[in-house]
Image (cartoon, rainbow, N blue to C red):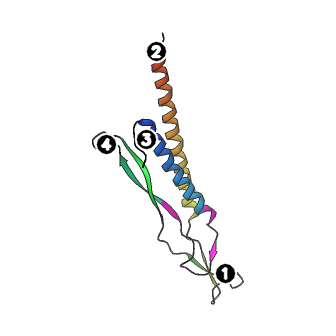
Amino acid sequence: MTEIRNVFDLGSRALSAQMQRLNTTASNLANASSMSGSAETAFRALRPVFVVDEAAPGSGLAAPRADRIVALDRDPARIFRPDHPNADAEGFVYEAAVNVEEEMVEMLEASRSYQNTLEAMSTLRMLMTRTLSMGDR
């Protein structure tokens, strides 16, 4: 765990958390149309689980951190496709338990959060630079 020393560390951690969301969502979308020969081996959508790390108790500084990535508890769709190479003995395949529309919403939310955090850090940097330049006048 990286130490939280200032607001830029907070921003960096927030950006990393959103990047983790984007990466798991991209993995989900990449596997959305995959087929498996059994329900147990079918792909299930993944989600990062975030925890909040506090810099020091009472400091007011806290940042998100991806603690782990978990598979969602969803049943894959059972589809009759006897011609599919992964079909089981009864001719069924199991489609990945991924809702593409939900994943697109997740991607939009993560992307907007990433952009907002980046904009806040950029504004803070600009304000700090202007504050420092005030002494040069």
Three-letter code for the amino acid on which mark 1 is drawn: Asn
Say if the magenta span includes residue 34.
Answer: yes
| Residue indicated by mark 2 | 134
Please tell me which of labels 3 and 1 falls first in the chain: 3
- Asked whether 69 or 55 is in front, the reply is 55
Q: Main secondary structure of the magenta part?
A: loop
* Residue reaching furthest to the top: 137
Please tell me which residue is depicted at 48% across the width and 50% down the height of the picture: 17
Please tell me which of labels 1 and 2 falls first in the chain: 1
SS at circle 4? loop
Please tell me which residue is depicted at 48% across the width and 35% down the height of the picture: 120
Please tell me which of labels 4 and 3 falls first in the chain: 3
Q: CA distance from mark 4 to mark 3?
A: 13 Å
| Residue indicated by mark 4 | 56
Please tell me which of labels 4 and 2 falls first in the chain: 4
Q: How many numbered marks have been drawn onto this rendered protein structure?
A: 4
Three-letter code for the amino acid on which mark 3 is drawn: Leu
For label 3, count other residues whose C-alpha is less than 10 Å away and answer few (under 14), some (14-19) or many (20+).
Answer: many
